[in-house]
Amino acid sequence: MSTGICYIFGAGERSGGGISLAPDDLVIAADGGFDYLEELGLRADYVLGDFDSVVSYDLPSDSIRYPKEKDDTDMMLAVKLGLEKNYTEFAIYGGLGGRLDHTIANIQALSYLARHGASGTLYSSDYAVRVVTDGTISFGKDLPENVPGNICSVFSLSDTSASVTIHGLKYETESVLLTNSFPLGISNEFTGKKAFVHVEKGTIAVLWYLPSL
């Protein structure tokens, strides 16, 4: 398994710069995500998609082109490539905002990662989403988003998410049951303390807001 991070850039809402790459990281541009990388001045290791949303005419000669009529979205193709390259940590930009159906599809891509032994986070300009299956997401007390009053919400994506425990947020729980038909976990808040959300069995989405740049 790689110790680096797989960065994927899509054609959705852009969130600015501030991305620092390490030598072991992998960068994948999914279709119009190539334009996003061009804007940031970053280079992709792989460029793929059906290229129905890319604007640039300077696509690399080794770009991987897929037919428009296919089962996988361009983002899912990028996710699967990252998994094939043995990455277990994914950071996805340009996967939120814009078309709502694509946003939902990209959250489903996070579920795919979680159920294949990997972790992924979708970033927009002002919030982030992470999906966890039978596991834990932790927040250190020094994270910029971990300030008292900042919103952090928890949703069940599976029919039921059993034994959900939340510690360190304003509203704490101990082994409660969440379902995907009632938003019990919405509008929790950071407190500035070390926090975590754990689900014993099931798949949850955790959404938190990011501080203004």
Image (cartoon, helix red, strand yellow):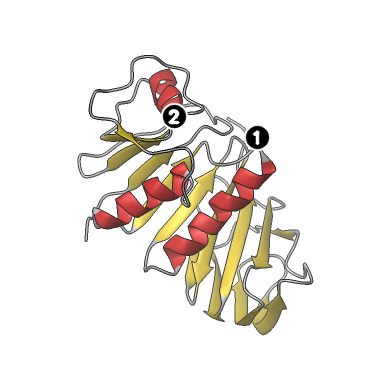
Kind of element beneath mark 1: loop
Position in image of residue 61 (x %, y %): 24, 23
The quadrant in which residue 30 appears is top left
Q: Viewed as shown, does residue 156 lie left or right of 37?
A: right
Picture quarter with the C terminus:
top right
Give amino acid for label 2.
Phe
Q: Is residue 164 visible?
A: yes
At mark 2, the secondary structure is loop
Residue 45, image x, y percentages: 25, 35
Quadrant where the N terminus sits is: bottom left
Left or right: 177, with 66 as reference point: right
The residue depicted at 42 percent of the width and 60 percent of the height is 119
The quadrant in which residue 86 appears is bottom left
| Mark 1 crowdedness (10 Å alpha carbons): few <14, some 14-19, many ≥20 | few
Q: Residue at x 61, y 39 (%)?
A: 211
The kind of residue tagged 1 is Gly
Residue 139 position in % (x across, y down): 51, 59
Q: Position of residue 173 (x, y in %)?
A: 68, 78
147, above or below 163, in the image: above
Q: Upstream in the sequence, badge 1 or badge 2?
A: 2
* Residue underneath mark 2: 51
Number of numbered discs overlaid on the protein picture: 2
Name the disc covering residue 159, or none: none
Check disc 2: other Cα within 10 Å, few if <14, some if 14-19, many if 20+: many
One can see residue 140 in this view: no
Quadrant hosting residue 8: top left
Which residue is disc 1 drawn over?
98
Q: Residue at x 37, y 42 (%)?
A: 7
- Horizontal relation, residue 187 to residue 63: left or right: right
What residue is rendered at 46% in x and 62% in y? 112
